[in-house]
Amino acid sequence: EQMPLRLTVNGKAQQISIEPRVTLLDLLREQLHLTGTKKGCDHGQCGACTVHVDGQRINSCLTLAMTTEGSNVTTIEGLADGDQLHPMQEAFIKHDGFQCGYCTPGQIMSAVACIREGHAHSPEEIREYMSGNICRCGAYANIVEAIMDVKK
Ligand code: FES
């Protein structure tokens, strides 16, 4: 049975109809065609699906879409300001914060939250905060550098 859901995604109001068991990740990717948010493990283990709900980072694969009723969701597609990349996106490019790029949207959403929530005072603190975002290419050192650069 389909249920009505209203939420705002990247500044745009959405009124949709979904099955109650659909995750926010599947809603974003399959119904709203926002495929920047990645499905790595689908079990809360990799961070590839990280988005912001009302400014808080969450694993969208562990979040039922219905629980975001009335919320403001931001995905990687909503970070840039028109043609102007977000400073964190610029920093990932400058510091080679990715190789294959699959984990990058989730890494960047976590990185933005890391600074916003005040957990970017040292490389150690950043590594701890970012520990839920797995990178199989091992770009960790460069990601920490990118975050330190935006923080300063
Ligand atoms: Fe959600 Fe891996 S896809 S944590």
Image (cartoon, rainbow, N blue to C red):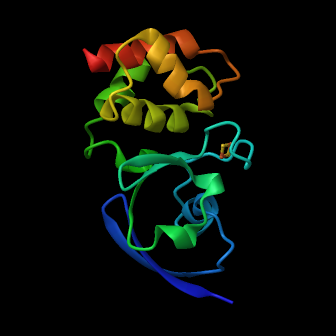
Give me the residue at 26% from left, 46% from top. 82
Give me the residue at 25% from left, 37% from top. 84
Residue 16: give x, y in percent of width and height: 49, 80
Residue 97 seen in the current view: no
Residue 22 in the image: above or below residue 38: below
Q: Nearer the viewer, residue 126 or 143?
A: 126
Q: Quadrant of the C terminus?
A: top left
Direction from residue 41 to residue 118 in the image, left or right: left
State the image quarter where residue 27 is shown: bottom right
State the image quarter where residue 93 is shown: top left
Q: Nearer the viewer, residue 100 or 60?
A: 60
Direction from residue 86 to residue 109 in the image, left or right: right
Q: Ligand 1: give its quadrant.
A: top right
Q: Nearer the viewer, residue 86 or 62?
A: 62
Residue 39 seen in the current view: yes
Give me the residue at 64% from left, 78% from top. 20
